[in-house]
Image: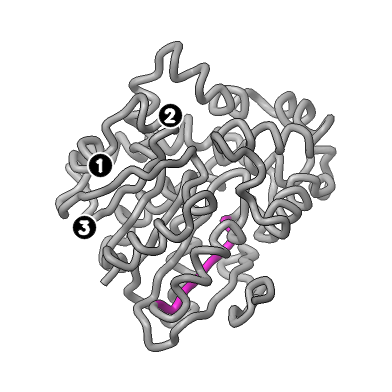
Amino acid sequence: MSWFDNFDHHQTLLNSVGMRYRVGGNPKGTPLLLVHGAPQTHVMWHRVAQLLQNDYWLVMPDLRGYGDASHALGLPDHSNYSKRAMAQDLAALMSHLGLERFHVCGHDRGGRVTHRLCLDHADRVIKACVIDIAPTLDMYNATDMAFAQAYYHWFFFIQPSPMPERLMAGDGTAYLHTLLGGMGGANALSMFEPQALAEYERCFSMPPLNGSDLPAMIHTMCEDYRASAGIDLDHDRESRARGDKIQCDMFVIWGERGVVNKMFNPIALWQAQCHGKVTGQTLPTGHFVPEEKPNDVAALLRAFHV
């Protein structure tokens, strides 16, 4: 089957934010929103989407700041790359598509957007799945030397602009490969489909933003992480102080070779943030679970999102 056969590709402007997304699958199936992580785009879901297309109506967007979605300079407080802003983008996209209620699954940064989507738009989400993350606030609160070494990129990306951007852009493709391979585990880059890897390389090498010398996606990816270390933590603390919790049932998938498995108890941490039932399963992978074990991920999503 050719690359993304049976899935329509769209670009649209919603609330002044450029959105790129693919939709397809079973138009009579339950809507399932698939949200990618960093440093990737929606194409990370290709293998899973092929396996689920007969069961669900699938929506796969690029988050703002990634792929061919909007790229803009970060605001001083990084609020335009907060998970709240990204979750609002996704809610607007699903409304644009006439999908008021839907299931959602997010990997990596997409899981953090999924968390905020469940809190800010609780009436929209039927069930939620997150892949290879624990709640952001808990992960930062537990930071020690071992975590800082394992997830060094969290602390590198959040340094003030333009230092991280310029260092990464010096040899962007090499750094991208190091990041993907280092978190990928045993199979390293070989787990990524050639078309997907080429897409990640293209986007990571995007030219500078208008009126700036900052490389577009590298800068906006850093802004995503800067938001997570600042305004997102403020939002999470405010939510916890109010007693806000995820209302729906949640399923958690994580890789047994990954940092989340080694350093956190994801089921317990997510259950503490949910009124719904939290279940989950580890898979024999590194961080990029959907691309390393797409058959297993598809089967778990099919069993949960019913």
Q: CA distance from mark 3 to mark 2?
A: 24 Å
First in sequence, mark 2 or 1: give its number: 2
The answer to whether 102 appears left or right of 90 in the picture is left
First in sequence, mark 3 or 2: give its number: 3
> Residue at the bottom extreme?
28
What are the residue bounds of the magenta stretch?
A: 56-63
Q: Secondary structure at mark 1?
A: helix
Observer-nearest of 128 and 150:
150
User: From the image, which quarter does the C terminus lie in?
Assistant: bottom left
Q: Is residue 84 visible to the viewer in this orientation of the structure?
A: no
Q: Report how many numbered discs are placed on residues in the image.
A: 3
- Amino acid beneath label 3: Asp
- Amino acid beneath label 2: Val
First in sequence, mark 3 or 1: give its number: 3
Mark number for residue 270?
1
Residue at 69 percent of width and 32 percent of height: 178
Q: Which residue is mark 2?
A: 259
- Magenta stretch containing residue 117, yes or no? no
The x, y position of residue 266, in whole percent, is: 29, 37
Q: Secondary structure at mark 2?
A: helix
The x, y position of residue 215, in whole percent, is: 79, 41
Q: Are discs 2 and 1 less than 8 Å apart at CB?
A: no
Q: Which residue is mark 3?
A: 249
User: From the image, which quarter does the N terminus lie in?
Assistant: bottom right
Q: CA distance from mark 3 to mark 1?
A: 11 Å
